[in-house]
Amino acid sequence: MPAVAEVMSTVACNPSPRGCDLPTCPVCADSMVAAEGSAYLSENVISYLWTCDTCGYGFVTKHAVSKRFVCN
Ligand SMILES: [Zn+2]
């Protein structure tokens, strides 16, 4: 069944990149499912590497990580 009709919100309402903040491919607009990898750019900025399964385009997104994300 087609799964491309998801409504993409630009509002980050979940600290997880796998939550509601998934990007779309800038080339073919396909929805990204899971990041290929991640890296911290600084103490509270994390970048995710995405590769499009449809066209193979790779790109990086950056996310601010709240200190409150860590709780133990
Ligand atoms: Zn693509």
Image (cartoon, rainbow, N blue to C red):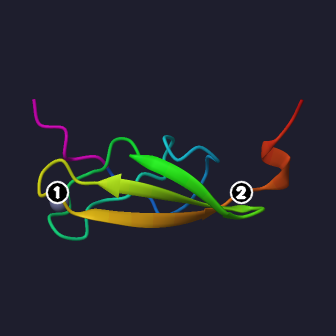
Instruction: Residue 8: tell me if it is visible.
Output: no
Residue that carries the numbered disc 1 in the rendered image: 56
Q: Secondary structure at mark 1?
A: loop
Above or below residue 31? Residue 2 is: above
| Mark 1 vs ligand 1: CB below 8 Å | yes
Magenta region includes residue 34:
no
Q: Secondary structure at mark 2?
A: loop
Q: Which is nearer the eye, 10 or 60?
A: 60
Q: Which is nearer the eye, 38 or 61?
A: 38
Residue drawn at x 42%, y 51% is 22
Residue drawn at x 20%, y 55% is 30
**Mark 1 surroundings: few (<14), some (14-19) or many (≥20) residues within 10 A:** few
With 47 as the anchor, is 33 left or right in this view? left
Circle count: 2
Residue drawn at x 39%, y 46% is 36
Residue that carries the numbered disc 2 in the rendered image: 65
Residue range (magenta) = 1-6
- Per the model, the C-alpha gap separating discs 1 and 2 is 27 Å
The three-letter code of the residue at mark 2 reads Val
Q: Quadrant of residue 71?
A: top right
With 23 as the anchor, is 28 left or right in this view? left
The C terminus appears in which quarter of the rendering? Answer: top right
With 70 as the anchor, is 24 left or right in this view? left
Residue drawn at x 84%, y 48% is 68
First in sequence, mark 1 or 2: give its number: 1
Q: Position of residue 37 (x, y in %)?
A: 46, 48
Instruction: Residue 30: tell me if it is visible.
Output: yes
The N terminus appears in which quarter of the rendering? Answer: top left
Label drawn at residue 40: none
| Mark 2 vs ligand 1: CB below 8 Å | no
